[in-house]
Amino acid sequence: MKNIFLIVLLTSFGMFGQNSAIDKTKKQSNFETITLAGGCYWCVEAVYENLIGVKSAVSGYAGGKIANPTYEDVSTGRSGYAEVVQITYDKKVTNLDEIFKVFFTVHDPTTLNRQGADVGTQYRSAIFYKNEAQKKAAQTIIAAMKKAGIYDSPIVTTLEPLTKFYKAEDYHQNYYANNKSQPYCQMVIQPKMEKFEKLFKSRLKKKK
């Protein structure tokens, strides 16, 4: 797979000054959300939690029809739900273009209903858009990748309207940060983190 960052340059983003006289209402309007499915939500969440400009990355479920799905419901692969991460980000610090570039870097959008050993419709590659602007932005980057021949296989990422987001159970939140010694974290999530940190070195949050 060719690397999208060899042909697409990242945009520079400004930070708020400490003495910025912006009222609370205006600050709130700077935040936007996008909901992404790229396989196991533990992986996706771990990456975005470390991207500058991301306020929160919450693991959950989207795309199904039953109300209040549980992990057990979703893990059957028959619920219609995908494991997703709802990302809230500051539009003055990052933007949807960068969010999507990270997304297409840390998962494989060419494998239908699977990521590695995780198999099932719940692990599909999908962008759940909440408005036409998000849909258009997703269509634009996918079209650009296809034109550039970034992948040897067809991109199978679906664009689905976000009808409802359900937060996953508490033990799924911040899973990587809380379970780094677990085999899945070391063998599956850690390589994704290393790839992300290498390609987005200048965009990482400072370690506390």
Image: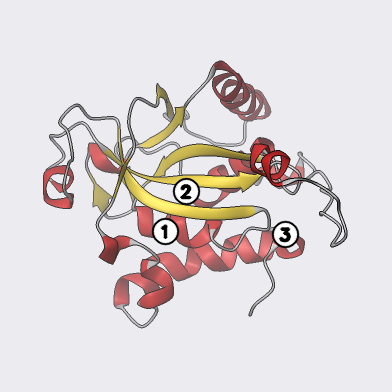
Residue drawn at point x = 48 percent, y = 53 percent: 57
Q: Does 155 sit above or below residue 76?
A: above
Amino acid type for the residue under numbered disc 2: His
Q: Name the residue under label 1.
A: 43
Q: Is 28 or 155 nearer to us in this picture?
A: 28
Give the percent coordinates (x, y) of residue 136.
60, 19
Tell me where residue 159 sits by quadrant.
Answer: top left
- For marks 1 and 2, the one nearer the N-term is 1
Q: Is mark 1 on a helix, strand or loop?
A: helix
Q: Is residue 2 visible?
A: no
Left or right of 182, for residue 151: right
Q: Where is residue 78 in the image (x, y as percent from the top left)?
A: 12, 34
Disc 3 to disc 1, C-alpha distance: 18 Å
Quadrant where the C terminus is found in the figure = bottom right
Q: What element carries label 2?
A: loop
Q: Mark 2 points at which residue?
A: 107
Label 1 Cα crowd, 10 Å radius (few <14 / some 14-19 / many 20+) = many
157 or 31: nearer the eye?
Answer: 31
Question: Looking at numbered disc 3 in the image, what kind of residue is underneath it?
Answer: Arg
Mark 3 lies on residue: 203
**How would you rate the neighbour count of disc 3 (Cα within 10 Å): few for under 14, some for 14-19, many for 20 or more?**
some
Question: Between disc 3 and disc 1, whose residue precedes?
Answer: 1
Q: Residue at x 61, y 36 (%)?
A: 150
